Each structure stands twice: as C-alpha cells, then as structure tokens.
Image (tube, rainbow, N blue to C red):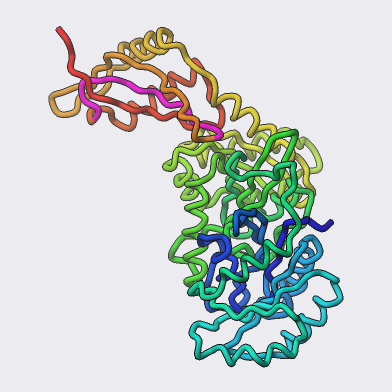
Amino acid sequence: MTRDRDVAIVGRPNVGKSALFNRIAGRRVAIVHDQPGITRDRISTEAEADGKKFRVWDTGGIVGSGETELRDEVRASAERAIEESALVLLVVDAQEGLTPMDRDLARFLRRQNKPILLVVNKIDHPKHEPNSAEFAELGFGNMFSISAAHGRNVGPLLSEIVRLLPGEPEEPTLEAAAAVKIAIVGRPNAGKSSLINALLRDRRTLVNEVPGTTRDSVDIECERDGRRYVLIDTAGMRARSKHSSSVEVFSVMRAEKSIERADVCVLVVDLAEGVKAQDRRIAALIQKARKPCIIVLNKWDLVRPVRKEREAMEQFVASARAELFFIAYAPILAMSARTGEHAERIFKEITKIGRAAHAHIGTGKLNRLLHAAFAANPPPMVGTRRLKLFYATQAGDDGHRAIPPPEFVLFANSPRLATDPFRRFLESKIREAEPYVGLPIVLTFRPRTETR
C-alpha cells in the first residue's frame, strides 16, 4: 500500500544514499562508510522541508554487492520501500559515472509508475558539474546535481520533494516523541531482527543467519492496542576485541547509544547457546544506564523438550536468572521469534512495567520502612563514620520519559558513606513494599546537616 508522504531513496551500493538520508534527516541516522553494502535494512525517519513533513526511507543497494545470500533480501526490502512510497529518489555517483547497474535500475523504476527524481551525487564543486551530463541518458526530466556529504544544492531538491508530495493528512501520523522507545539488543544472531518481525508481523528487517546483518540502529514505528511504540533494532553487540571492522565498532557504539535513548530495553539471549559473557556485559550496560528491562530467552522452539515443557522452561529461566543476577528486576520470558510463540507477551510486560512506573510509596510508609532497615542492618563504617538517614521521599515524575524509573531521595549525613552493597540492601527493602517489576530503582543521596 502506498503511503502518500513517504519518499524512498534507492540506488546501487555506495553512491551516497545514506549520506543523502542523513542530510535530509538533519542528523546522522544511517551509518555512512565507504564499504559497499553497509545498509541492509530499510531505515526511516521523519523529515521536514519548507514547513512540510514527510517520511524518508533509506534502502540497501538494490542490485549490488554484499554477501550473496543477502542480495535477494536486500533487493526485496528496497523494492517494498519503492512500492509503498509516493516518490522515489534515484541516486547515482557522478565520480564513477553512468554504469550498467544504473541503467538497469532506471528501467525497473520506470515500470513502477511513480514520480522519480534523479539525484546525481558527489558533485562537490562547481567544476564537477559537467560530470552530471551523461546521466541525462536515463531519460528522467527532474535531475538534481548535489553533494550529500557537503549539503551542496540539497535545498532545491528538498523543495521539489515537498512540491511533488500531496498535502499533509488531517489525521496525525505516529510521532516518535510520543511513543515508547524499545531497544532490542543482544549478541549477533540472537534473533533480534526476527523478534521485531514477529512483533510487527512483517518482514521489515532482514533476517539472515550471517551474524551482524543489522549494522544500523533501525527505528520502526508501530501501534498496538492504541499505544504507540518505536522498535529500535540494533546491531549485534560483541566484545570489542572481536570487532571485525570499523563499521562493526561504529555499529556497537550505535547500539550502546540506543540503550541510552530507549525507554525500555529488551535483551535477547540465544537460549540454544545459553547466557554468555557478552550477554552479561550488555545487561550491565542496561543496568548502568538505569533502564527498564525485559530479558527474552529466544529460540525456545529449538530446545523445547517432548515432555515436561513447563518444568524445562522454568529451569531455563532459573539458570538465566542466576547468570544475570545483578539485573534481577528484569522479567524473563522464553519465546520463539521465528515462530512468533509468546512474542505478544513482550507488549503485555511493557504495559505492566508502564503501570508499575506510576506506583508511589507514601512518605510516611517509606520512612518507616527505611528507618527499620537501618536499625535491623546498620550500614558499615567507612573510616570512622557511618551513614545516617534523616528523611526520605519519592521523587515525582519529570514528565520527560514515557516510563520513568522510580527515584527515591534520601537525605543523609554524607552521601559518600552509602556503599554499593548497602544501596542494594535498601533497594531490596523498597521492593518488598512495591516490586517495581522491570524497573531499576534509583536511590539519590543528598547531604543534610543533623539538627540538634
């Protein structure tokens, strides 16, 4: 189905599609690198020009390089973006000149009966302008000579894009800012893209057995039961010593940033392999970022026993809980992304976590609970001093996060006296009063002079 305000960027590999995508978006969304075939998935973002909004799609090189087994999937994904878009930008490389691939793609696009703008990229200087002349052979009336890397002549292209698109719809589209952002993270080949496809019931992201298929962090908007979500599919995260290229290093950096900007993190673990050291490292990143979390044990279909399924699932969950004990607040789900079994439970858990985020412990109850904890298990001496609690309260929601973790402010004689083990002890006591499932508890200590 065509989306009236969607624009697809297509072209053979390494002509600068992602650079143009980032230029239109006004920020770096897609990875830009001189290695062909970097973009495999369809990546989209909201853009605006001349006061009008539209959605732009970056696609993989539609007729080109990359691993052989990925080519058909990359092409199919790009063709789907063309089919669903109202306008197509065909990007070519002025430095390399007109190629047979460009001609083949131009013939394919003409059969789609869509408005097409020919974008001759890498015209970085006026003296390069003659390089664009040969592309007139492709027969497209609207041709723009630009430099996506430097922004040269991109303004007139944007004006033509919004001129050709229909008026903005009266009904608002999904807005990423109002949605719950869910980062899907994990080791390579754990099934992150398969999980997103199961949640979307669509082949939006590429699913392939080559580890590292997803190199960008891909934002995909969806709506479920009236609630808006943005699913962030991230590159598989391996230990830094195992990064095979600069592209992979950048991908992992992007995945780490995805954790930072997410409202909820879904850590996908390969159940067939069990919890590995890198799973623990990723869980530690989530914990350090103080993010709500769900742990998904994927590939249940590969390990399901013939008998006593429930007991086996409980054992797998218990084993994972023991390995990831330090992020005990995260619920653990066993499921199969490939078959879609139990995938819907993720949205249900996120709904529960969202409700739990608004749970409040009254000030009186909180102070009685914490003073009792201090009395039953006094904090350790730090040098010649011991942490002393005067007063505690639960901080209010600042309204900036879709799912805010509960924060408690403790006024004490000296915040530096609060050791990590004692913080964890106080957190466990708070959870006895209110579980806050899926949510980290933030304890903020503030100094206060004791009055006599």
In the rendered image of this protein, does residue 114 appear above or below residue 120?
above
Q: Residue at x 63, y 81 (%)?
A: 120
Quarter-of-image position of residue 94: bottom right
- Residue 346 picture quarter: top right
| In magenta segment, residue 206 | no
Please state, as top left, top right, bottom left or bottom right, where the N terminus lies in the image.
bottom right
Residue 212 placement (x, y as % from top left): 60, 65
Q: Quadrant of the C terminus?
A: top left
| Quadrant position of residue 309 | top right
Q: Position of residue 248 (x, y in %)?
A: 51, 67
What residue is at 45 percent from the left and 38 percent from the top? 290
Is residue 277 among what the camera can see?
Answer: no
| Vertical side of 313 occupied by 281: above or below | below
Residue 254 left/right relative to 308: left
Q: What stretch is highlighted in magenta?
A: 402-415
Relative to the observer, which residue lies in front, 162 or 175? 162
Residue at image point 70% right, 42% down: 172
User: Could you tell me residue 315's position as x and y percent?
Assistant: 64, 36
Q: Is residue 111 visible?
A: yes
| Count of numbered marks | 0
Question: In this picture, is 377 found above or below 399?
Answer: above
Q: Position of residue 358 (x, y in %)?
A: 54, 23
Residue 414 colored magenta? yes
427 relative to 214, above or below: above
